[in-house]
Image: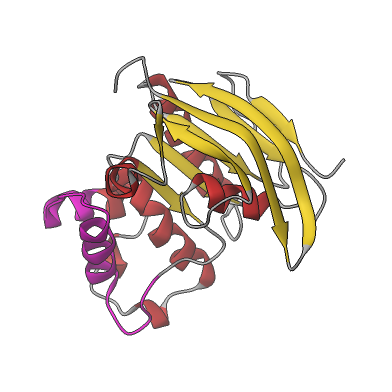
Amino acid sequence: MTQDLRLQLKDLACSKGGRPLFSSVNLSLNAGQWLHLKGPNGSGKTSLLRLIAGLTEPDQGQIEWREKNICSSRAEYAEQRLYFGHYNGLQESSTVLENLQYLCALHGCAVSVAQIHAVLLQLGLRATANKMVRYLSQGQKRRVAMARLWLSQASLWVLDEPFVALDYASIGQLIEKMQTHLAAGGCMVLTSHQEINMQQPAPIILEIGQ
């Protein structure tokens, strides 16, 4: 990851069902920086994350990654960002291993079975590799979904309430992984109702709906 990575939000505006959520959002995020998005429920935090992830388009303004409009470079951008939303995105009738193989392939990330097993071991999920997802607890499902962060090669992480359903130990593992990602020159945008005890670097904070 090079030091020229950056995300730029330029005069963004968004509405939902005809109701304005936010407007005139401007922000720059450089390599190694992360944005903590804050605001009350219904203020548009998830809507802004989905805009940044390239899943929807703004009513006004534009988003640039490496000085390219993400709407005009969708395929390239999709390979460089990872979106981790409220839903785990797992197929209940497939095994943990099959799910992770599919999700990695879907995002253009080539990983081996050995790499997946190594990550599952690290996350305390070794025994689940060949189990169908439907038989896992909610906490296990969330950790399986979280394993994508360990397997991804994306430079930008867009995370919507990533700590939901995680126990204390798993939260600690995730925060450590976030710090490693940023130290390697990655970028991160997230929203969370929980306090994030990340030592370094300090976040850029954006509050919407105030």
Q: Position of residue 61 (x, y in %)?
A: 60, 39
What residue is shown at x 43% (from left), y 75% (from top)?
136
Residue 156: x percent and y percent?
Answer: 41, 36
Q: Residue furthest top?
A: 3
Quadrant in the picture for the N terminus: top left
Q: Residue furthest right?
A: 210
Question: Where does residue 157 sit, x and y in percent of width and height?
Answer: 45, 41
Left-right relation of 205 to 117: right
Of residues 156 and 47, the one drawn nearer to the viewer in this rendering: 47
From this viewpoint, is residue 171 visible?
Answer: yes
Within the magenta stretch, is there residue 91? Answer: yes
Residue 118: x and y, percent?
A: 22, 49
Does residue 129 sit above or below 56 in this rendering?
below
Q: How is the image coloured?
A: secondary structure
Q: Residue at x 12, y 53 (%)?
A: 112
> Magenta segment, which residues?
90-118
Question: 22 and 111: which one is in front?
Answer: 22
**The quarter of the displayed image where residue 65 is located:** top left
Q: Is residue 100 left or right of residue 146?
A: left
Camera-side residue of 65 and 174: 65
Point 59% across, 41% down: residue: 190
Q: Quadrant of residue 31?
A: top left
In the figure, is residue 107 to the left or right of 144?
A: left
Q: Quadrant of residue 11?
A: top right
Q: What residue is drawn where x is 83% and y is 45%? A: 209
Count of residue discs: 0
- Reply above or below: 5 against 99: above
Q: Is residue 114 magenta?
A: yes
Q: Visible in this render: residue 123?
A: no
The C terminus - image quarter: top right
